[in-house]
Image (cartoon, rainbow, N blue to C red):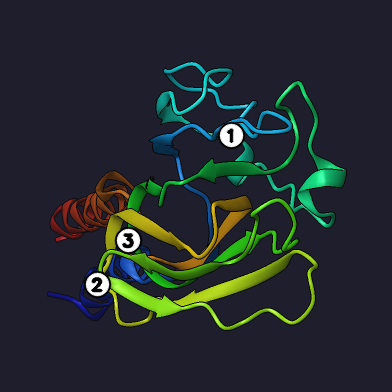
């Protein structure tokens, strides 16, 4: 095989390897499943949820969509200033219940962390949770000074690549309020066809090169 042909094969292999190298990114889930929030003074529903289930019914089983928890809106006010009777405020609130949320992703992801945005008003039975976990990795939530909404980041560097995160939130008081969840990590690989096309293109060029070599001979 000529030096040029050998180099072309090496280039093709390098392109395929490059296509499968992890790419750093902010990761967005394709959907999440959970039970809807509950009602008290207001309705603390996932009012923008796009999947199946009724987002205007307490504790309705929601699946196959996205909504308030991944819409990019992080609440900066306590629940009593941010929520409303229509249930379209930024928080989802669960009463007397430790919520479980399953987040689904389109690709395998090597997660580094996920961040929760909670309310901690210490008003009306709303406080920060005591702990959170994802796929068995758990952490206690340190005491938040004051009563303002706050963020807690869970370290997921020890987690193997996955396309599903099952999250459990353990409350301290009667209510837990969550406005947003964000994810950081690396997509572990692009879909196979993309890398395959790179390799096929390179091999096609190699075949054409060999045909021209034979004709010239």
Pick whichever of labels 3 and 2 is earlier in the sequence: 2
The x and y percentages for residue 122 are: 72, 63
Picture layout, residue 36 above or below residue 82? above
* Residue contact between numbered discs 2 and 1, judged by CB atoms under 8 Å: no
- Gap between marks 2 and 1, in whole Å? 27 Å
Label 3 and label 2: CA atoms lie apart by 14 Å
- Of the 4 image quadrants, the one containing the C terminus is bottom left
Tell me the SS state at disc 1.
Answer: loop
Side (left or right) of 129 relative to 119 = left
Residue at the spot of label 2: 160
Foreground: disc 3 or disc 2: 2
Q: Residue 89: x, y in percent? A: 75, 35
Say if residue 24 shows up in the picture.
no
From the top left corner, tell me how far across and down residue 39 is, in percent: 61, 30
The vertical placement of 92 against 149, above or below, is above
Left or right relative to 144: residue 139: left
Q: Which label's residue is closer to the chain start, 1 or 3?
A: 1
Mark identifier at residue 67:
1
At a point 61% along the width and 52% down the height, the residue shown is: 178
Foreground label between 2 and 1: 1
Q: Residues within 10 Å of mark 3 (few under 14, many from 20)?
A: some
Q: Residues within 10 Å of mark 2 (few under 14, many from 20)?
A: few
> How many C-alpha atoms fall within 10 Å of the one at disc 1: few (<14), some, or many (≥20)?
some
Q: Which mark is residue 189?
A: 3
Q: Quadrant of residue 138?
A: bottom left
What residue do we see at 63% from left, 38% from top?
A: 68
Describe the element under mark 3 as helix, strand or loop: loop
Quarter of image, res 149: bottom right
Q: Earlier in the sequence, mark 2 or mark 1?
A: 1
Relative to the observer, which residue lies in front, 18 or 159? 159
Number of marks? 3
């Amino acid at each position: 095989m000529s030096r040029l042909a050998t180099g072309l094969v090496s280039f093709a292999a390098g392109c395929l390897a490059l296509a499968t190298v992890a790419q750093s990114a902010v990761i967005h889930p394709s959907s999440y499943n959970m039970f809807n929030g509950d009602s008290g003074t207001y309705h603390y529903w996932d009012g923008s949820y796009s999947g199946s289930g009724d987002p205007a019914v307490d504790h309705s089983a929601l699946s196959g969509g996205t909504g308030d928890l991944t819409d990019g809106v992080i609440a900066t006010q306590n629940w009593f200033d941010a929520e409303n009777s229509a249930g379209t405020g930024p928080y989802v609130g669960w009463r007397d219940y430790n919520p479980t949320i399953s987040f689904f992703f389109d690709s395998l992801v090597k997660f580094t962390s996920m961040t929760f945005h909670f309310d901690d008003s210490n008003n009306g039975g709303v406080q920060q949770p005591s702990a959170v976990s994802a796929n068995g990795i758990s952490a206690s939530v340190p005491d938040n000074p004051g009563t303002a909404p706050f963020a807690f980041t869970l370290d997921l560097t020890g987690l193997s690549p996955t396309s599903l995160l099952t999250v459990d939130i353990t409350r301290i008081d009667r209510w837990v309020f969550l406005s947003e969840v964000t994810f950081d990590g690396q997509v572990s690989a692009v879909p196979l066809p993309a890398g395959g096309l790179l390799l096929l293109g390179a091999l096609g060029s190699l075949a054409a090169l060999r045909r021209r070599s034979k004709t010239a001979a």
